[in-house]
Amino acid sequence: MAVSVKEVAARAGVSVGTVSNVINRPDMVKAETVEKVHAAIDELGYVPNAAAQALREGQSRSIGFIALDASNPFFTDVALGAERQAAREGLSVLLANSDESVERERSHIELFERGRVRGLLVSPLVEDLARLRDVRRRGIPVVLVDRGTEDTSFASVSVDDVAGGELAARHLLDGGRRRLAFVGGPTSLRQVTDRYRGAAAAVASVDDASIEFVETMALSLRGGMRVGAELRPRVAAGEIDAIFAANDLLAIGLQQGLLGGDEPVAIPGDVALVGYDDISFAAAAVVPITSVRQPRELIGETAVTLLEELREPGAEPRQVVFEPELVARASSASR
Amino acid sequence: MAVSVKEVAARAGVSVGTVSNVINRPDMVKAETVEKVHAAIDELGYVPNAAAQALREGQSRSIGFIALDASNPFFTDVALGAERQAAREGLSVLLANSDESVERERSHIELFERGRVRGLLVSPLVEDLARLRDVRRRGIPVVLVDRGTEDTSFASVSVDDVAGGELAARHLLDGGRRRLAFVGGPTSLRQVTDRYRGAAAAVASVDDASIEFVETMALSLRGGMRVGAELRPRVAAGEIDAIFAANDLLAIGLQQGLLGGDEPVAIPGDVALVGYDDISFAAAAVVPITSVRQPRELIGETAVTLLEELREPGAEPRQVVFEPELVARASSASR
DNA sequence: ACCGGTAGTTGAATCGTTTCAAACAGTAGG
DNA sequence: CCTACTGTTTGAAACGATTCAACTACCGGT
């Protein structure tokens, strides 16, 4: 069905080797021949078969990117950065969505491994990195994205989530808040626990301040709305005067939950709100949301760079950590 | 480097054919042999090479999905639906982002064609479908997503954008608005022109109503903000009392532009706002945005189904058209 | 002892591309 | 006329999985 080098060769009246040379090293072929072959390629609509190339080369020209949640704009921006850098090196990025499901993460890893991708960027779901270690042992370089780890045998690009959590909590404390709630989950996500730890550290340094951990099932709009509605009476009762959400989707949902219903509370009047990631929708919310910004596209670019570094023989895996930055908006204004 | 059937065969003390049989038709192999082979597979960490399989089969188990803008939650939801349906059929979906760039669209089409994907779902950028016709001629089935076409030789899944535009405009007119503005662009996108046409038709049926086309560079938050700021004085001057945005990203940006600056206007007091797609952020905006809803995940699922249908010999390409639905929120309340 | 049949296993051929040693044609130098 | 060399082209081998005709071993029946 599909056109192969063989047909092109026959049409141009040369051998398959020559066709391949025309494509890959045209300067060692006579100009006249090059022309003949190109004519044949165009006439037949020849498109090289990537499967055959990958088989020959031992690996494909693609990088696999497994995101925690592709519907979170944070990850699409990271992916955009990765694509950009990959394009510069003549590679492409295939995006897969683990949707916070361990099972899907597993099946995507396998899919990419079967595809002999050139490398894997993973925003890993679980604390257990054993599976990724297996992948690496089989010769596929792995870079962890948005997640640092003590295991320095992995290359990683991350943002200091403990510092980010501290930044957020300190900002709330500086604004005069004392009864904080941290909303996030599942606790199996490192991002969630680190951000909480940072916030808790900041809170511990202030005498009369406290922080409470409110666990959610997922870092989603929906999850936030539910918790927001639950927390509303407690805010009204003065038990909570500030909420730090583990990401912006959650924060936006929380805001909806808090502002909805029969007896909405005021933001920032009754309660201050801080999110994380600074996705573009955070600024567009009912009350613009203060957020901890991460250099999203830079994270993606750097991940691809680290991946390419890993391929050099004897290369040491690097851990790159960026610093987060607080973007203050109306949702956390002092009272 | 990587482990192949050959090594597995050697380790298990059988031939390569037997290893393959164990994997693909275990019931014709002696139980004892199956066990031996599985042991070898586990010990060596064998992962089948998808490139070799694809080469042999003539095509891969993956479907390519080229989205107009992967950072638009609308498309990630469509992709989610597609993935779900694909998973049911044992396939996977590879996502690529054309970012409203014709050049990137072209390069992704080529990438997928090289990869001999099983089919292509495309949300096409340009009116010119010639390139897709070439792809199809080379034997790769194509389904157009979110875009109908007169060319009935293409299978497509779309939502009636003319009806959607009419729905939006009629809603605004019913609310007493008369001086409408349609904001969208580029005009090369069918979605944009169809939605405008529908709106214009509704406006034409009301005597003293008018509609104006305001063109933007892209359907993005940023583009909306810019136009919103530009339109603000004209709204204040009473020249415009309703805005229909070609999608929700634009609408959210517009809202920010209208509400910002020194002399913000009131929504829906001074101007009503309607968006399109009903992405989850629309409801979370400063003023919750009325929007025309499309069955996002269903679109994705249906696209995959149509693709599989196309593979059956002699199958006729189907055009599926869904009906849009208006979701009224605060941004378009009557005065 | 021979035939037919069943169950299990084998290994060569195939897919499309790239590589590389070898072949070839032509030219300059001796 | 031979040698050495350059520039160009060739065709077979290799990558890994699957398929399928051919083969082996064994059993039951005659």
Image (tube, coloured by chain):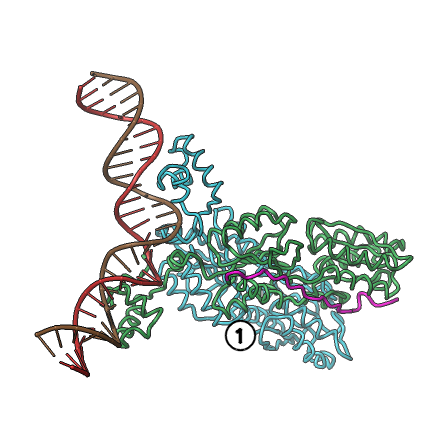
Chain colours: A cyan, B green, C brown, D red
The residue under the point 46% across, 47% down is A47
Question: In x, y percent, where is residue B263?
Answer: 84, 56
Position of A200 with respect to A117 (left or right) is right
* Residue at which label 1 appears: A187
Question: In x, y percent, where is residue A248?
Answer: 64, 66
Q: Nearer the viewer, residue A330 or B231?
A: B231
Q: Nearer the viewer, residue A178 or B71?
A: B71
Q: Quadrant of residue B122?
A: bottom right
Dot 1 falls on a residue whose secondary structure is loop
Question: In x, y percent, where is residue B253?
Answer: 73, 57
Assess whether residue B317 is covered by the magenta stretch: yes
Q: Which residues are magenta?
A: B313-335
Q: Nearer the viewer, residue A241 or A24?
A: A24
Assess whether residue B245 is covered by the magenta stretch: no
Compared to C19, does A226 lie above or below? below
Neighbor class of circle 1 (other Cα within 10 Å; few <14, some 14-19, many 20+) is some
**On what subunit does the disc labeled 1 rest?**
A
Q: Amino acid at mark 1?
A: Thr
Position of A280 with respect to A32 (left or right) is right
Residue A162 shows up from this direction: no
